[in-house]
């Protein structure tokens, strides 16, 4: 059975792009196994099994619309759930975040949506599509958690991205900062299952989608960087089987393993690189990959008398961008935490 949810479009990707500016009526259906499916808005669909479940799972992608591999994977999971080829064992809210940037095949149209959460959209022009959308996504997530059955004891959110820049560690996760919490072993096990062996532990509250669900709703949330940006249809989905499998296991209702089967290395920020003036010089090459390592003593930047030299045995750069305006952050230096 193919579902009529997205007809006449082939799948949620085509449907989302065709309906970016259309106000759609919510749609509701019950699959033969009893799973309730609710289509809430363009690119937003919810599955609720009729069996007792213990997890609320938010799976999002396309917050940056050109990051297509996870969108393709998630679209296929949705198809399989609708066709009942994928077991529905937990309640799941799927979100394709930014329809307009999917159409434009760009990271964003007016404003980077992944800086608009935790209510920060209120500081922007609310007539902008992405600003309005961020506000709506916050409301859908809030309702999804508010409507939980009493059997639910845990919340998780995986916000799936791909990166523009090469990475010395191809896949990595960002674990948002929430005061007084540590990364649970079971989530490390999920990351290892998804072939993600690197996690950056944030030490400051942020305004990303995953920060929103972890800070406001106490979810175990991650921003997942799963590989390189490619246009729709040009992804080698074999490189993404780990995340596909790990998500499908969770959706089916299988418990996370207690311990990771592969090492997951943790990194923390040891220095924030700020572009301090027009005379500021940056010594990391433009082509540097995320997680490229630099030895102790290496000069990262210099501005007159001020400079920063690598202080630890080795430090690693992420998100280097010396082209930012003066006063903004031009990258982060990380240090690796001792493995346990
Ligand atoms: Zn992204």
Image (cartoon, helix red, strand yellow):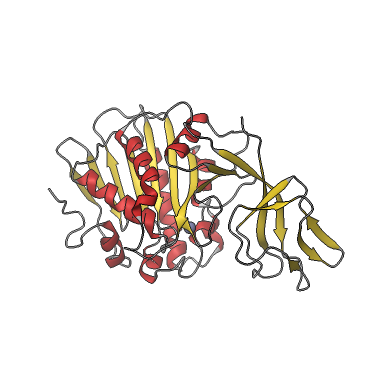
Check the image and report above or below for 8 versus 262: below
Residue 141 image offset from top left, x and y in percent: 41, 46
Quarter of the view holding residue 313? top right
- Quick one: which residue is furthest to the left in this view? 1
* 292 with respect to 99 (left or right): right
Between 243 and 133, the one lying in front of the other is 243
Taking the spot 29% from the left edge, 53% from the top edge, the residue there is 75
Residue 20 image offset from top left, x and y in percent: 32, 65
Work out whether residue 96 can be spotted: no
Total numbered labels: 0
Taking the spot 62% from the left edge, 33% from the top edge, the residue there is 339
Work out whether residue 151 can be spotted: yes
Residue 264 image offset from top left, x and y in percent: 54, 37
Residue 206 image offset from top left, x and y in percent: 59, 50
Quarter holding the C terminus is: top right
* 281 with respect to 241 (left or right): right
- Quick one: which residue is furthest to the bottom in this view? 278
Quarter of the view holding residue 142? top left
Check the image and report above or below for 93 versus 283: above
């Amino acid at each position: 059975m193919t579902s009529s949810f997205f007809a006449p479009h082939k799948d949620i990707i085509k449907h989302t792009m065709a309906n970016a500016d259309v106000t759609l009526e919510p749609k509701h259906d019950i699959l033969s196994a009893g799973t309730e499916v609710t289509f809430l808005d363009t690119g937003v669909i919810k599955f609720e099994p009729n069996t007792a479940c213990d997890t609320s799972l938010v799976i999002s992608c396309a917050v940056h619309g050109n990051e297509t591999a996870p969108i393709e994977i998630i679209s296929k999971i949705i198809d399989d759930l609708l066709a009942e080829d994928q077991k529905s064992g937990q309640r799941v809210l799927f979100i394709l975040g930014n329809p307009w940037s999917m159409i434009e095949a760009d990271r964003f149209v007016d404003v980077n949506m992944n800086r608009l959460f935790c209510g920060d959209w209120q500081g922007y022009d609310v007539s902008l599509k992405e600003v309005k959308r961020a506000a709506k996504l916050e409301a859908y997530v809030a309702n999804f958690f508010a409507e939980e059955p009493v059997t639910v004891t845990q919340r998780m959110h995986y916000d799936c991205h791909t990166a523009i820049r090469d990475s010395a560690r191809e896949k990595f996760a960002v674990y948002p900062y929430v005061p007084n919490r540590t990364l649970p072993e079971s989530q490390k096990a999920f990351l290892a299952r998804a072939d993600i062996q690197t996690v950056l532990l944030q030490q400051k509250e942020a305004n990303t989608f995953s920060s929103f669900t972890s800070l406001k709703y106490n979810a175990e949330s991650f921003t997942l960087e799963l590989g390189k940006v490619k246009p729709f249809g040009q992804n080698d989905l074999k490189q993404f089987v780990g995340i596909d499998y790990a998500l499908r296991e969770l959706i089916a209702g299988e418990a996370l393993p207690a311990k990771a089967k592969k090492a997951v290395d943790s990194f923390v920020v040891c220095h924030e690189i700020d572009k301090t003036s027009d005379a500021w010089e940056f010594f990391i090459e433009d082509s540097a990959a995320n997680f490229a390592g630099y030895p102790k003593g290496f000069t990262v930047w210099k501005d007159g008398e001020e400079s920063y030299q690598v202080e630890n045995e080795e430090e690693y750069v992420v998100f280097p961008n010396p082209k930012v305006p003066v006063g903004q952050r031009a990258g982060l230096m990380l240090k690796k935490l001792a493995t346990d």
